[in-house]
Image (cartoon, helix red, strand yellow):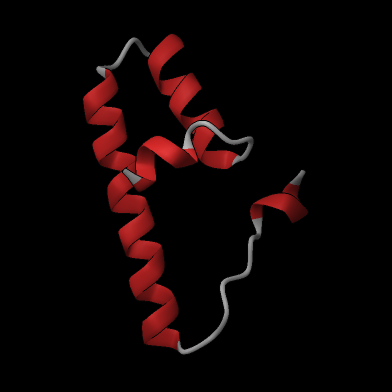
């Protein structure tokens, strides 16, 4: 459910989802699966490093 929610709001996940669906013609469920994994990996990285999450994407724009 988190992946469904995150693609409805502006941000890097929504852009990634739209690009993968429209430009590359990939399946919607496989793209949601990839986004789920990205969310899980970020959560575990924050826990492992014991530091707050820093959104580097907003600095790149």
Q: In percent of the image, x 28 and y 51: which residue is there?
A: 37
Residue 31 at what x, y percent from top left? 30, 30
Between 36 and 9, the residue placed more toward the observer is 9
Q: Is residue 42 above or below residue 25?
A: below
Answer with left or right where residue 18 lies relative to residue 56: left
Q: In percent of the image, x 58 and y 36: which residue is there?
A: 9
The quarter of the picture where residue 23 lies is top left
> Residue at the bottom extreme?
50
**The N terminus - image quarter:** top left
Q: In percent of the image, x 52 and y 31: which residue is there?
A: 8
Q: In percent of the image, x 38 and y 35: which residue is there?
A: 4
Residue 34 at what x, y percent from top left? 29, 40
The quarter of the picture where residue 5 lies is top left
**Residue 54 visible in the snapshot:** yes
Give the number of callouts. Answer: 0
Residue 47 at what x, y percent from top left? 39, 82
Residue 21 at what x, y percent from top left? 39, 16
């Amino acid at each position: 459910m988190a992946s469904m929610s995150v693609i409805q709001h502006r941000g890097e996940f929504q852009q990634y989802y739209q690009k993968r669906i429209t430009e590359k013609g990939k399946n919607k469920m496989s793209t949601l699966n990839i986004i789920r994994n990205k969310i899980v990996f970020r959560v575990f990285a924050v826990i492992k490093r014991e530091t707050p999450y820093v959104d580097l994407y907003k600095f790149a724009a």
